[in-house]
């Protein structure tokens, strides 16, 4: 090897080592924190919060006076008239000019004095909408946290399943090697060797299938974290055994805590208040409204002296109040009241359904976790017995005291026991973790 090639190789190995060292692992909490900042669904909900806050500002601004400026400019042509008269503001102007230019200018202002409480209630309504939007963000974060927990534990399960596959492959390979040695010695027929080779091939196939499953869950986690597909994602490998057998909280306590803390329940309670405000606002349509109005106006016309002198002489100020009393609106107000009542009824039904769904989720997670814990403890005993039986049978097969069928039977029993233990452990850990999310 050339010295330059040797140096390049050393540098490459050093860079690879540094990269591997610098590569951070993703714990479950890190995944959750990252998703809360980067997940698109959560970002969309935050935009909705900002939109709701703008609606609150708009509603509050309705209490303030509105001021506007207006002007109009016109040109009049009377080609056949020796003289003409026209109305300019409050004056009748007579001119001999065939072409006349006129202009008017005004500033007007209006401020509501009384509207049956519609503005104040609309402000409260929009404040409720803003709070509901914030709760929707919290609900989205909890939903993402639940989904990440589910996928994360599935990744851990798939990773350990691959480790178990490697163990089964090693056992099968040892059997094949022993069988080939016995075949070469004339102590085993070719059919028995082929049967063990087939088992080895099946074990390798199962490993490929588990690798595919792991890749699929890893991709799902990347999507939840909004990471590029090419990004390397290495998850931490905590000890799930302790979590799987951790004591479970009492269902009633979890449900009581969830009713107090879950954002979907709070949002439904606010929806009831919102429907009550909708009805109050609709009833305001039957009440009179009073507003204060003020304005300043002036005008000018050509052929009638200096423009600024005209604007000064024609300047006028006005102030007054406007009272509006609803008499008949083709039933729109009554329909709005009826619609608000139906919305309240719907909100009450939605709240009942939310509580029912909440209890069902808690009960399901508790039942699954309890069942999985019991199955895990039983599976541990079964795996221990199956492993002992296989080790004894394997030794007896090596000594020629057991045949290939008995060996394969114990091997299959051990593989099934290991798989059941693995499934029960991660099912207990997953459902226990999801149950505790509702207890916070």
Image (cartoon, grey):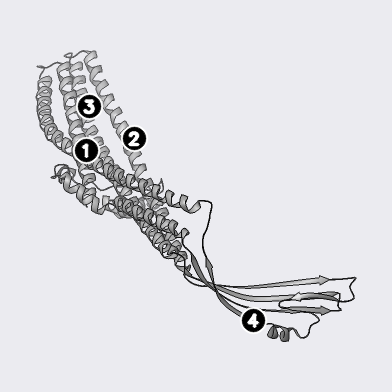
Q: Residue at x 16, y 48 (%)?
A: 253
Task: Give the mark, 1 or 4, whose residue is nearer the N terminus.
Answer: 4
According to the image, label 3 marks what residue?
Answer: 173
Residue 18 visible, this angle:
no
According to the image, label 2 marks what residue?
Answer: 212
Q: CA distance from mark 2 to mark 3?
A: 22 Å
Q: Residue at x 11, y 17 (%)?
A: 402
- Indicate whether 234 appears above or below 132: above
Q: Residue at x 34, y 35 (%)?
A: 212
Q: CA distance from mark 1 to mark 4?
A: 83 Å
According to the image, label 1 marks what residue?
Answer: 427
Q: Which mark is residue 25?
A: none
Task: Give the mark, 2 or 3, whose residue is nearer the N terminus.
Answer: 3
Label 4 crowd bin: few (<14), some (14–19), many (20+), radius 10 Å: few
Where residue 430 appears, as percent x and y from the top left, is 23, 42
**Between 137 and 290, the one nearer to me in the picture:** 290
Task: Give the secondary structure at mark 2.
Answer: helix
């Amino acid at each position: 090897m050339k010295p330059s090639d040797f140096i390049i190789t050393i540098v490459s190995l050093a860079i690879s080592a540094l990269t591997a060292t610098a590569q951070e692992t993703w714990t479950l909490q890190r995944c959750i924190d990252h998703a809360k900042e980067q997940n698109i669904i959560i970002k969309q909900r935050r935009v909705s919060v900002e939109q709701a806050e703008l609606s609150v500002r708009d509603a509050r601004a309705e209490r303030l006076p509105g001021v506007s400026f207006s002007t109009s400019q016109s040109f009049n042509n009377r080609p056949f008239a020796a003289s003409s008269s026209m109305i300019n503001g409050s004056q009748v102007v007579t001119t001999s000019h065939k072409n006349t230019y006129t202009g008017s200018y005004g500033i007007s202002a209006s401020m509501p004095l009384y509207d049956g409480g519609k503005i104040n209630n609309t402000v409260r309504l929009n404040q409720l909408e803003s709070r509901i939007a914030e709760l929707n963000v919290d609900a989205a974060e909890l939903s993402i946290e639940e989904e990440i927990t589910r996928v994360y534990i599935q990744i851990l399960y798939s990773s350990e399943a691959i480790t178990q596959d490697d163990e089964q492959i090693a056992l099968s390979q040892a059997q094949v090697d022993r069988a080939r040695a016995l075949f070469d010695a004339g102590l085993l027929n070719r059919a028995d060797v082929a049967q063990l080779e087939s088992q080895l091939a099946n074990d390798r196939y199962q490993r490929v299938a588990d690798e595919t499953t792991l890749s699929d869950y890893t991709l799902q986690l990347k999507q939840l974290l909004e990471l590029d597909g090419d990004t390397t994602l290495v998850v931490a490998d905590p000890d799930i055994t302790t979590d799987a057998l951790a004591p479970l909280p009492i269902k009633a306590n979890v449900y009581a805590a969830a009713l107090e803390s879950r954002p979907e329940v709070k949002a439904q309670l606010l929806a009831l208040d919102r429907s009550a405000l909708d009805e109050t606002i609709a009833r305001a349509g039957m009440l009179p409204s009073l507003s204060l109005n003020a304005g300043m106006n002036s005008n000018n016309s050509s052929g009638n002296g200096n423009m600024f002198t005209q604007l000064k002489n024609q300047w006028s100020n006005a102030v007054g109040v406007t009272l509006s009393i609803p008499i008949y609106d083709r039933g729109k107000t009554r329909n709005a009241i009826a619609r608000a009542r139906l919305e309240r009824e719907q909100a009450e039904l939605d709240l009942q359904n939310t509580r029912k769904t909440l209890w069902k989720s808690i009960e399901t997670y508790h039942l699954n976790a309890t069942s999985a814990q019991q199955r895990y403890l039983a599976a541990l005993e079964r795996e221990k017995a199956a492993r002992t039986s296989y080790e004894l049978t394997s030794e007896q097969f090596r000594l020629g005291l057991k045949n290939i069928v008995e060996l394969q039977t114990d091997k299959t029993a051990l593989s099934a026991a290991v798989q059941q233990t693995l499934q029960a452990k991660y099912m207990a850990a997953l459902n226990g973790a999801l149950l505790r999310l509702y207890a916070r």
